[in-house]
Image (tube, helix red, strand yellow):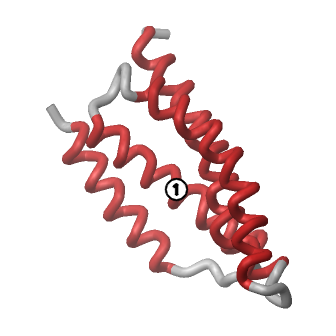
Amino acid sequence: MESGVLTIARAMALLVLSNVFMTFAWYAHLKNLSDSKWYIAAVASWCIALFEYLIQVPANRIGYTALNLSQLKILQEVIALAVFVPFCVLYMHQPLRLNYLWAGLCLMGAVFFIFKG
């Protein structure tokens, strides 16, 4: 495998893991702590978000060695949606919506334009 491809793959793997933590930090309290005070949910979310940042910062530093900032951001958004949809459906028991497909297609258009020569 080419060095740049391996670097991007490592950054992507870390971004996926980071996004799992981020998604739980931002939204899991809606299910798990809905009867708690908002500040309890905020503290719990901050504790989870710490792990997100401990993974996300190195992921962005690694990714920035092979991608420009715009490419890194679009990659992050695609990963965020790829993590968010299963979280919604499997963890939060939300219905799978066709809008997720349309949003994904829009993001793929963004990927095309950002990564195109």
From the viewer's perspective, tell me whether residue 109 is left or right of residue 75.
left
Quick one: 53 or 73, which is closer to the camera? 53
Q: Circle 1: is it few (<14), some (14-19), or many (20+) Cα within 10 Å? A: some
- Measuring from the top left, give residue 52's x and y in whole percent: 64, 47
Q: Which residue: 25% across, 38% down?
A: 115
- What kind of residue is marked 1? Ala
Q: Outermost residue toward the bottom?
A: 35
- Figure quadrant of the C terminus: top left
**Quadrant of residue 86 within the rendered picture:** bottom right
- Measuring from the top left, give residue 41's x and y in whole percent: 75, 75
Q: Which residue: 40% across, 69% down?
A: 103
Query: Where 60 sits versus 86, above or below?
Result: above
Question: How many numbered marks does the figure carry?
Answer: 1
Q: Which residue: 74% across, 66% down?
A: 43
Quick one: 17 or 55, which is closer to the camera? 55
From the viewer's perspective, tell me whether residue 113 is left or right of residue 22.
left
**Quadrant of residue 13 within the rendered picture:** top right
- Measuring from the top left, give residue 106's x and y in whole percent: 32, 64
Query: Where 27 sits versus 77, above or below?
Result: below
- Measuring from the top left, give residue 71's x and y in whole percent: 30, 39
The residue that disc 1 covers is 80
Query: Where 6 sits versus 105, above or below?
Result: above
Query: Where 113 sits versus 27, above or below?
Result: above
Secondary structure type for disc 1? helix
Q: Which residue: 43% across, 9% down?
A: 2
